[in-house]
């Protein structure tokens, strides 16, 4: 531990955030959590952000057994981590900062709360001078942030009552994350039960995304995937509390060009084998028991889960803080004073709250306040096949399509990407799924004569294929805004939308991100990734491209 114990300064605080630049073996963090646990005057919430080099790059939010403790492990150099961190820090612990680096001082001052304390085991004279220039006053072996520069005001935390519209993966995750923070939540669902929309499929697959340049979609998907794995474990685990199997996913290379790009990614050595391992054709074929002529990626921690069972586990975790208003039909929103009223088709009030979260997937743009969001609706038909008509798989198998191992005698194959809104099963979509399935398993007769069975769902998809997470923009008031933070928003209205085909992994992290923002807590992602999910990004993109803003989602879908 540092000679100065952060617990000396947290009494009387509702929330306390500690930053440690060296996680090491975790002993300091463990001791800090124990000190918090044993202190009757502890703050309600302790948030620890610690730097480490033992994980994949990015922010890793690690669920804790105590609801009041949050741990973020950040795999990045100090300067880069501070530049992208979204937090207000109350106590800083610096270790081993020997050398000429002083660039961290300005970033640290940007994040420091009023009267934040700084403890250290060593600082160079140049580093002390840099910190003093930023407003830190040194007192013996510690320092205090005493800058007179005004701190940006954090928005007030709203009354911890919210309405969530939509009880699929997005809405159930939002409800659980809110309830875990002490919010009272009313969950409004069109249908009589949860997971009836796109979340109603028998199986969804979970796996990361790879790219040679580790671009923003790759980083976001990796963060969501890794958080989802930890989050599901906290709910009881895949294959236990949640129906499914962490059996691994084998992604076949599409062709030799794809295989060559994959080899280059593997050769860079960024991924440990438990996360992603490239297999050449012979080894991939041996593991699969079927031809894998161009090789494949093996994602050992991947697998499949029934989305409905994930929803059930999340709702069960909400406890008594959750009120269900299911079977509500099509609803609309009306602003009334400082609150939103959720109204049914006859104009009756279903629920009221100052905070409303739209998580209704493809149906969200029926609401006037979300009608201009650039979300398209894509039809997806999944084919259900008797296990006896297919080879037995040790993994989920995917390429342009996917095939799950059989569960309950049924395997799932699909899914189509159609531009129409026909909810019925159709033979043409079944044949499309079967053709891609046969190419996957290299068996021209696989699934032949199978009955027309499956399910149709509708995905909500943004133009950049990334979710929309955050306060919804007011398109009518957008004017000539050029910065995200200046885009006018509908007060108290938020979105968790556009999860496309990755709702299983997007739902937990996106809900955690939104609730962290509502609570003014440190965010579980780097700021450039947070901005990449902001619903207002489309206001700025339309402005910069010179295009008119869409008047409805349908306008964009047809462009």
Image (cartoon, helix red, strand yellow):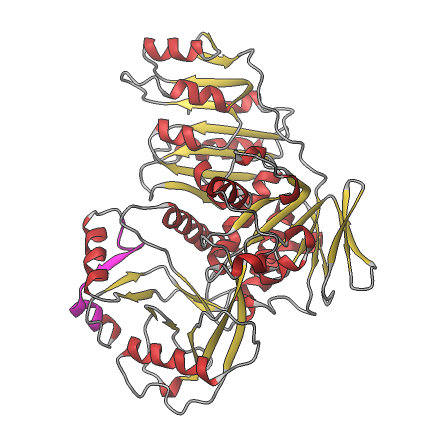
Point 38% across, 45% down: residue? 216
**Residue 504 image point, x, y percent:** 49, 60
Indicate yes or no whether the magenta region holds residue 273.
yes
Which stretch appears magenta? 271-285
Indicate yes or no whether the magenta region holds residue 495.
no
Q: Is residue 409 at least partly visible in the picture?
A: no
Q: Compare residues 142 and 543 and report the one nearer the observer.
A: 543
| Residue 500 relative to residue 356: left or right | left
Q: Compare residues 160 and 345 and report the one nearer the observer.
A: 345
**Residue 154 image point, x, y percent:** 61, 28
Q: Quadrant of the N terminus?
A: top left
**Residue 312 image point, x, y percent:** 59, 64
**Residue 429 picture quarter:** bottom left
**Residue 58 picture quarter:** top left
**Residue 35 image point, x, y percent:** 52, 30
Q: Residue furthest bottom?
A: 449
Q: Compare residues 392 and 359 and report the one nearer the observer.
A: 359
Q: Compare residues 301 and 344 and report the one nearer the observer.
A: 344
* Vertical placement of residue 222 versus 415, above or below: above
Q: Residue furthest left?
A: 282
Give the total number of marks visible in the rendering. 0
* Vertical placement of residue 97 versus 323, above or below: above
Point 56% across, 72% down: residue? 421
């Amino acid at each position: 531990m540092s000679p100065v114990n952060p617990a000396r300064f947290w009494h009387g605080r509702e929330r306390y955030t500690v930053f440690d630049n060296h996680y090491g073996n975790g002993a300091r963090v463990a001791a800090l959590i124990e000190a918090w646990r044993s202190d009757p005057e502890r703050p309600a919430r302790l948030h620890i952000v610690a730097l480490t080099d033992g994980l994949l790059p990015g922010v890793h939010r690690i669920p804790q057994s105590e609801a009041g403790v949050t741990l973020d492990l950040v795999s990045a150099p100090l300067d880069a981590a501070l530049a992208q961190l979204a937090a207000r820090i109350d106590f800083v612990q610096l270790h081993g900062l020997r050398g000429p680096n002083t660039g961290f001082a300005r970033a640290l001052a940007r994040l420091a709360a009023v009267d934040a304390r700084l403890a250290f085991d060593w600082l160079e004279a140049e580093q002390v001078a840099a910190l003093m220039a930023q407003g830190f006053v040194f007192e013996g072996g510690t320092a205090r942030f005493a800058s007179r520069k005004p701190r940006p005001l954090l928005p007030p935390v709203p009354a911890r009552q919210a309405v969530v519209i939509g009880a699929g993966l997005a809405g159930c995750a939002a409800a659980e994350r809110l309830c875990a923070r002490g919010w009272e939540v009313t969950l409004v669902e069109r249908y009589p039960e949860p997971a009836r929309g796109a979340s109603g499929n028998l199986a969804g697959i979970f796996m990361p995304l790879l790219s040679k340049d580790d671009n923003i979609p790759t980083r976001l998907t990796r963060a969501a995937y890794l958080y989802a794995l930890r989050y599901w474990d906290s709910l009881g685990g895949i294959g236990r509390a949640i129906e499914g199997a962490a059996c691994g996913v084998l992604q076949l290379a599409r062709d030799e060009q794809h295989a060559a790009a994959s080899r280059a990614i593997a050769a860079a050595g960024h991924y440990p084998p438990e996360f992603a391992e490239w297999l050449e054709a012979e080894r991939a074929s041996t593991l699969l028991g079927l031809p894998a002529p161009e090789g494949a990626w093996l994602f050992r921690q991947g697998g499949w889960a029934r989305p409905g069972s994930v929803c059930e586990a999340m709702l069960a975790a909400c406890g008594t803080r959750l009120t269900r208003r299911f079977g509500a039909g099509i609803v609309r929103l009306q602003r009334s004073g400082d609150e939103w009223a959720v109204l049914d088709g006859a104009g009756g009030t279903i629920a009221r709250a100052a905070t409303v979260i739209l998580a209704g997937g493809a149906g969200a743009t029926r609401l006037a306040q979300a009608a201009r969001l650039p979300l398209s609706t894509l039809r997806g038909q999944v084919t259900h096949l008797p296990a006896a008509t297919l080879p037995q798989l040790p993994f989920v198998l995917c390429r342009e399509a996917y095939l799950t191992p059989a569960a309950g005698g049924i395997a799932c194959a699909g899914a189509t990407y159609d531009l129409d809104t026909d909810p019925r099963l159709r033979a043409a979509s079944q044949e499309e799924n079967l053709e891609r399935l046969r190419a996957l398993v290299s068996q021209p007769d696989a699934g032949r004569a199978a009955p027309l069975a499956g399910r149709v769902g509708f995905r909500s998809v943004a133009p950049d294929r990334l979710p929309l997470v955050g306060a919804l923009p007011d398109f009518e008031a957008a004017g000539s805004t050029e910065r995200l933070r200046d885009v006018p928003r509908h007060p108290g209205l938020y979105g968790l939308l556009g999860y496309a085909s990755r709702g299983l992994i997007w739902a937990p992290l996106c809900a955690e991100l939104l609730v962290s923002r509502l609570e003014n807590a440190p965010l579980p992602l780097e700021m450039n990734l947070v901005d990449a999910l902001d619903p207002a990004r489309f206001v700025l993109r339309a402005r910069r491209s010179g295009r008119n803003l869409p008047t409805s989602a349908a306008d964009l879908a047809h462009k």
